[in-house]
Amino acid sequence: MSRIGRKPISIPKGVTVAVKDSEVMVKGPKGELQARVHPAISVEVAGQEVHVKRASEEKFHKALHGLWRANIQNMVTGVTQGYEKKLEIVGVGYRAEIKGKKLNLQVGFSHPIVFGPPQGIKLEAPTQTNITISGSDKQLVGLTAAKIRSFRPPEPYKGKGIKYEGEYIRRKAGKAAATAAK
């Protein structure tokens, strides 16, 4: 049996988990999430714990078992604590600001990039070079951070661009001087 899949998920106070026709709904102080579980996986709520079970010992079902246990755990964590990703902007003249609910990025193009976040995602720009993405859905927070980073990924020569906080950018050496070759 999957080591992760067989662990029960404890439900904290203030969180409700409901299962109806392979649809799992988790409600908590930070929001409400729902997901449709694969038909080979069954989810049962017993008291203050959630148990995830699989249909057979097939390799595919074993993989789904651990996956859906982790997904439901992430949903419970998301509605209690929430998730957050931080981005840093590196480059002269590169900056970010929030206008209304939209993110306005100036990252070296002739025009600003205006990004409207998906529903359930909150964007903040505490400084001109930092962006904080927060929400209760772990997948959506990560996807939004990756989308914003894709507007100007960091380049390897000077490191200019949008990067995750703490991300290491592997640098390359530039061209050697022309006089050194002669």
Image: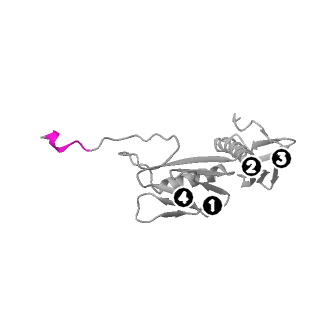
Colour scheme in use: one colour
What are the residue bounds of the magenta stretch? 175-181
**How many numbered callouts?**
4
Sequence-wise first label, 4 or 3 = 3
Mark 2 and mark 4: span between their CA atoms?
Answer: 27 Å
Q: Nearer the viewer, residue 84 or 38?
A: 84
Label 4 close to label 3 by CB (< 8 Å): no
The image shows residue 115, relative to residue 175, as above or below, that is below
Q: Which residue is mark 3?
A: 14
SS at circle 1:
loop
- Picture residue at 41% right of the left edge, 62% below the top: 109
Query: Could you give the CA–CA distance between mark 1 and mark 4, rounded to whole angstroms?
Result: 17 Å
Residue lying at the far right of the rendered structure:
47
Query: Residue tagged by mark 1?
Result: 118
Q: Is residue 144 left or right of residue 21?
A: left
Q: Is residue 179 left or right of residue 94?
A: left
User: Label 4, on which residue?
Assistant: 97
Q: Which of the two discs, 2 and 4, labels the residue nearer the N terminus? A: 2
- Left or right position of 93 against 142: left
**Residue to which mark 2 is pinned:** 79
Identify residue type, mark 2.
Val
Give residue 9's quadrant in the image. top right
Q: Quadrant of the N terminus?
A: top right
Identify the amino acid type marked 4.
Answer: Glu
Which of the two residues, 77 or 6, is positioned nearer the viewer here?
77
User: Dot 1: within a 10 Å radius of its alpha carbon, few (fewer than 14), some, or many (20 or more) residues?
Assistant: few
